[in-house]
Structures are given as structure tokens and as C-alpha cells.
């Protein structure tokens, strides 16, 4: 798995305490989401620290084919499978490559990592936390993930995937004049961050 243990555990805890942590044993793997980000780990490759983190908050892991939402103070809410969470299939549909630029947009308590569409040069933001959780030192025997890529040049959702794991995050939209920053950066060449 190519996600940083410490940061991902914090994201799991925050989801459980606030918006609800969605957990499923679906699509031949373990799916986690807070409704925005989605992670998928192939069955048989789920690290023990991830299972322990889920158990710490929910007290249980889903059985094969089950998906539920867990929220602090509430009972588990069983859900239906959502095709949007099928990250192996979503990755196959994501043919538009993006590059991670070295730029971060920062304002008070907000940080966004800027990515560039390889086809159009359009620059789009994602929450910096969504990029910062990637940790290629955690790969072990796995290959470095492919991505980010999206299913359109607008990059509504960006995905990284290797043979055992996938990570998908939504783009962030700038408003109130901030979108001018992205327009001015469009078409510039950037050295990609590894």
C-alpha cells in the first residue's frame, strides 16, 4: 500500500468522527471512503495496521460483499454497493494523464496541490492532504503506482493505482477570483514532482 500509515489513520479517524467512514469488502478488495476520497486495497494485500485502524473505530470488518457506514455514536448503517467505488474499473476508464506540479496554493487554513493535465496544460487543484498521504517508501515489494489520471481532461476525480492498491480523490474548485491563478498557470511547463 502506498499511503502513509500515520496520515491515513488520521483521515480514517476524522471520517469516523465527522462525516462517517464507509467501509466495504467489495470489488475484490477492501474499500474505504469518507464520501470524498476513496481507497481500495486488493483482498489478501490489506496490511494489518489498516485492519487494526478500522477495528479500533468500528469494532468489526465487513464480510465479503458487505458495505457499511460507521460514525462515532451511531450504529453501523449497511449500504448498497456503489459503482463509483470500483477503483480497479475506474482506473481502467481513466485515460487522461496528469502531472503533479511542485506548486502548492496556500491561504490561511487551506492548501491545495496543483496538478497539470498533460493533454491541455490546464492546472487543477486537489487538497494538499490528498497528495501528502501518498508515500512511495511504503511500497515494499509492490510497484510504484501509475497516475494520477482521470476519465476526462477536466479531472473531476484523480486516481493512482498499482497492483494492490488504488487512491482516488476529487479535484477542488476555486471560486471568488482564485480561479484566475489557475488560468494564469495554464499551459506553463512544470517539472513533475515524484
Image (tube, rainbow, N blue to C red):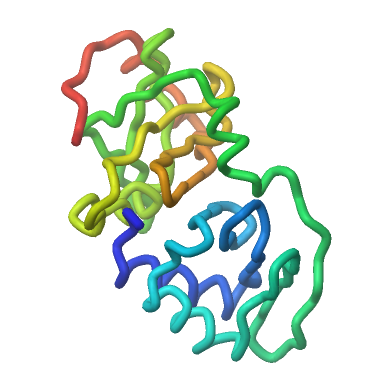
Left or right of 179, for residue 147? left
- Comparing 8 with 54, the one in front is 54
- Who is closer to the viewer here, 2 or 114? 2
Query: At which x and y percent is residue 138?
Result: 24, 59
Q: Residue at x 25, y 54 (%)?
A: 139
Quadrant where the image shows the C terminus: top left
Residue 186 pos. (x, y %): 36, 13
Query: Relative to residue 175, is residue 85 depicted above or below?
Result: below
Q: How many marks?
A: 0
Left or right: 103 as drawn, with respect to 125: left
Give the residue at x 76% y 50%.
82
Q: Nearer the viewer, residue 170 or 184?
A: 170
Q: Is residue 80 visible?
A: yes
In this image, 181 relative to 43: left or right?
A: left
Whether residue 175 appears in this view of the structure is no
Q: Position of residue 2 (x, y in %)?
A: 32, 54
In the displayed structure, would residue 4 be above or below residue 12?
A: above
Residue 13 or residue 97, whichever sits in front: 97
Residue at (61%, 86%) from the top-left corner? 58
Taking the image as shown, residue 95 lies to the left or right of residue 76, namely: left
Q: Is residue 15 above or below residue 175?
A: below
Q: In the orientation shown, which residue stands out farthest toward the front?
A: 44
Point 18% across, 55% down: residue? 137
Q: Position of residue 51 (x, y in %)?
A: 47, 78
> Where is residue 50, by image quadrant?
bottom left
Image quarter where the N terminus lies is bottom left
Q: 56 above or below 24?
A: below
Amino acid at each position: 500500500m502506498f499511503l502513509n500509515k500515520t496520515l491515513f489513520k488520521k483521515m480514517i479517524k476524522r471520517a469516523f468522527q465527522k462525516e462517517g467512514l464507509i467501509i466495504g469488502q467489495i470489488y475484490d478488495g477492501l474499500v474505504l471512503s469518507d464520501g470524498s476520497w476513496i481507497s481500495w486495497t486488493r483482498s489478501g494485500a490489506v496490511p494489518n495496521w489498516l485492519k487494526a485502524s478500522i477495528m479500533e473505530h468500528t469494532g468489526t470488518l465487513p464480510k465479503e460483499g458487505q458495505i457499511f457506514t460507521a460514525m462515532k455514536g451511531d450504529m453501523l448503517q449497511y449500504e448498497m454497493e456503489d459503482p463509483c467505488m470500483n477503483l480497479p474499473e475506474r482506473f481502467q476508464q481513466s485515460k487522461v494523464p496528469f502531472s503533479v506540479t511542485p506548486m502548492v496554493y496556500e491561504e490561511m487554513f487551506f492548501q491545495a496541490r496543483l496538478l497539470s493535465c498533460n493533454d491541455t496544460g490546464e492546472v487543477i487543484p486537489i487538497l494538499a492532504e490528498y497528495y501528502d498521504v501518498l508515500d512511495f517508501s511504503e511500497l515494499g515489494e509492490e510497484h510504484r503506482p501509475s497516475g494520477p489520471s482521470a476519465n476526462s481532461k477536466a479531472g473531476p476525480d484523480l486516481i493512482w493505482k498499482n497492483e494492490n492498491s488504488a487512491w482516488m480523490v476529487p479535484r477542488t474548485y476555486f471560486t471568488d477570483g482564485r480561479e484566475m491563478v489557475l488560468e494564469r498557470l495554464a499551459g506553463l511547463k512544470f517539472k513533475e514532482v515524484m
